[in-house]
Image (tube, grey):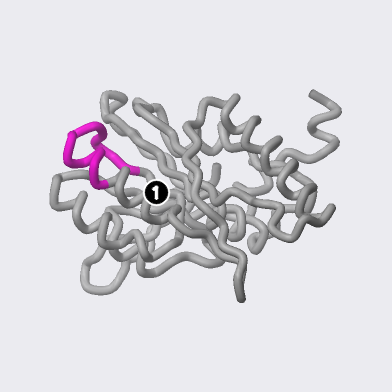
């Protein structure tokens, strides 16, 4: 997918890497953490067609680059029928169908909450990711943490696990990268529009399968 491109960041704090492939020993242990809500919102902003599905197993293969996967976790706030409406119930059912597919693809699912007050927002997802990053580093469960999220609340955890000698790969989008996450991570994988297109599953793709 694409070519290796690198752009330096200020004060020697690493670089952006766009759609790259480079050889790494397969013995390196990789743990992948996907912030489901954050990633999906960015996907939609990047042009994921409405009603299509994203190929998460394909993304995992792309991010691994032949290395050893020791765990892949999908974090998501759970939708509730907070107003007892048909629309909310449909959203609940659609999310449960989606999560069933994600689980069938081998992901561990960790659930947060969605708070419905003056603004609909997730609670607890970033905390769960941060805890798993820290505990995994402290217990030496992985060599490389791939963080598929642009949430800068994860920066303290990223700083900590780097002090434990771990490599952190931030996965974001070329059109809307998180500069904070890129600066703090060891390197950044930014998905190009062509990458998103290749990893999009449309209705016609499903019918042809």
Q: Which residue is mark 1?
A: 147
Q: Residue furthest front?
A: 84
Q: Residue at x 68, y 43 (%)?
A: 95
Q: Residue at x 61, y 59 (%)?
A: 41
Count of labels in the image: 1
Residue 179 position, x and y percent, is 39, 69
For this rendering, which residue is in front, 125 or 67?
A: 125
For this rendering, which residue is in front, 25 or 81?
A: 81
What span is in magenta?
134-145
Q: Residue at x 22, y 67 (%)?
A: 12
Q: Quadrant of residue 143?
A: top left
Q: Quadrant of residue 151?
A: bottom left
Residue 84 position, x and y percent, is 77, 55
**Viewport quadrant of the N terminus:** top right
**Viewport quadrant of the C terminus:** top right
Mark 1 lies on a secondary structure that is strand
- Verify whether residue 149 appears in magenta: no
For this rendering, which residue is in front, 114 or 35?
A: 114
Q: Quadrant of residue 88?
A: bottom right
- Give the answer, above or below, for where 196 lies relative to 15: above
Q: Residue at x 17, y 41 (%)?
A: 138
- Verify whether residue 137 appears in magenta: yes
- Give the answer, above or below, for where 4 lies relative to 109: below
């Amino acid at each position: 997918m694409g070519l290796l491109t690198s752009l330096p960041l200020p004060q020697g704090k690493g670089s952006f890497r766009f759609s790259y492939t480079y050889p790494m020993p397969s013995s390196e242990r990789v743990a992948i953490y996907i912030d489901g809500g954050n990633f999906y919102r960015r996907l939609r902003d990047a042009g994921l067609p409405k009603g299509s599905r994203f190929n998460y197993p394909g993304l995992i293969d792309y991010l691994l680059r032949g290395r050893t996967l020791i765990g892949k976790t999908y974090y998501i706030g759970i939708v509730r029928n907070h107003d007892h409406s048909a629309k909310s119930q449909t959203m609940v059912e659609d999310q449960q169908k989606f999560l069933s597919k994600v689980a069938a693809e081998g992901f561990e699912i960790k659930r947060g909450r969605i708070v419905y007050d003056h603004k609909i927002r997730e609670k607890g997802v970033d905390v769960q990711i941060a805890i798993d990053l820290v505990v995994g580093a402290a217990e030496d469960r992985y060599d490389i943490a791939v963080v598929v999220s642009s949430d800068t609340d994860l920066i303290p955890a990223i700083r900590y696990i780097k002090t434990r000698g771990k490599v952190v790969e931030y996965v974001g989008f070329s059109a809307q990268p998180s500069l904070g996450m890129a600066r703090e991570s060891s390197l950044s994988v930014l998905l190009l529009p062509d990458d998103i297109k290749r990893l999009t599953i449309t209705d016609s793709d499903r019918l042809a399968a």
